[in-house]
Amino acid sequence: MPNLRPSPISPTVDFDADGVQHGFLRLPYSRDDSAWGSVMIPVCVIRNGEGPTALLTGGNHGDEYEGPLALYDLARTLDPKDVSGTVIIVPAMNYPAFRAGTRTSPIDKGNMNRSFPGRPDGTVTEKIADYFQRHLLPRADIVLDFHSGGRTLDFLPFCAAHVLPDKEQEQKAFAAVAAFSAPYSMRMIEIDTVGMYDTAAEEMGKVFVTTELGGGGTSRAETVRIARRGTLNVLRHAGIVSGAVEKTPTRWLDMPSGDCFSFAEDDGLIETMIDLGESVEAGQVVARIHSVGRTGGAPQEIRATMSGVLAARHFPGLVKAGDCAAVLAVVE
């Protein structure tokens, strides 16, 4: 049976009120330094009458920064006179992870993007996921969730959506990806979709788009510009913000199968043999892993199992067995 327990999260904003509101999603959290403390997740609502609703999120993983930078800026600058409908902005979904600069929450080690549908009586991360599942996603017509590679991956800057059983829903998602106008646009597959925010939104029939905009646990001027322009483009495409979509050239990529992913089989020092965006032939060495325990050992060679371009690489230099070393994609 579904969990019908009320969410412990209380919003300090009214999602149905016109104007601009800056507030919090307040989650009670009793801890050693604050017996009646709370996790205060920043939220902004910008509403102007009836119309579609966009839910914009960043910080799903706490060490990914283009989304928060673009969304904190949008919350400060978007004029409700330019809006027809509602824009809900949560710049840092997993706020404890964001404040710690880590992928997962320092409170419960929860990975927000593997915690859906969540539980109102679960861990802190599960409680946040449950609030999105039951209270925010149902309001949305279109969802834009920002990601980048965090501290352990580096990506080509792309906007993406998933191939879906519902082809009408899929077409709407890829139309929004095209409107985002990142340098690359991806038809994306996931290693494991269980518990993902993406999956929760798509199963509700929402138009869901996401990004990977670099990585390395930081941001670049270029990738932040892509995020800011892309956010407004998606809102314009959805008819929520006035103005024309600012189109720039994009190169479409496809991830057709699990052969896109290559994994390290040993611990060591990784040497990337191909740079991001470069062409790769099946069988080509894309990375080498050097043993660091002693000298004299031959490196493990990681070979591409398909032809394409290098879309992502491991970051930084040391890897562990099982780490994703490289991701390939096919140019459409």
Image (cartoon, rainbow, N blue to C red):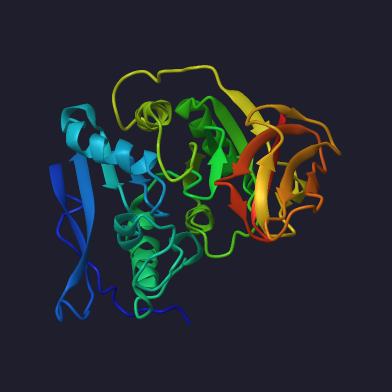
**Snapshot quadrant of residue 76:** top left
**170 up-or-down from 220: above or below:** below
| In this rendering, position of residue 155 left or right of residue 2 | right
Between 312 and 145, which is closer to the camera in this rendering? Answer: 312
**27 up-or-down from 253: above or below:** below
| In this rendering, position of residue 47 left or right of residue 111 | left
**How many numbered marks, from 0 up?**
0
**Which quadrant is home to the C terminus?**
top right
Between 291 and 149, which is closer to the camera in this rendering? Answer: 291
Between 28 and 200, which is closer to the camera in this rendering? Answer: 28
Q: Is residue 49 visible?
A: no
**Snapshot quadrant of residue 156:** top right
Residue at (49, 37) in percent of width and height: 214
Residue 161 lies, in percent from the top left, at 56, 41
Residue 226 lies, in percent from the top left, at 42, 28
Residue 33 lies, in percent from the top left, at 17, 77
Residue at (16, 54) in percent of width and height: 14
Between 1 and 246, which is closer to the camera in this rendering? Answer: 246
| Residue at the farthest front position | 295
**107 up-or-down from 271: above or below:** below
Residue 133 lies, in percent from the top left, at 40, 63
| Residue at the farthest right position | 283
**64 up-or-down from 192: above or below:** above
Q: Is residue 264 visible?
A: yes
**Snapshot quadrant of residue 194:** bottom right
Residue at (21, 32) in percent of width and height: 78
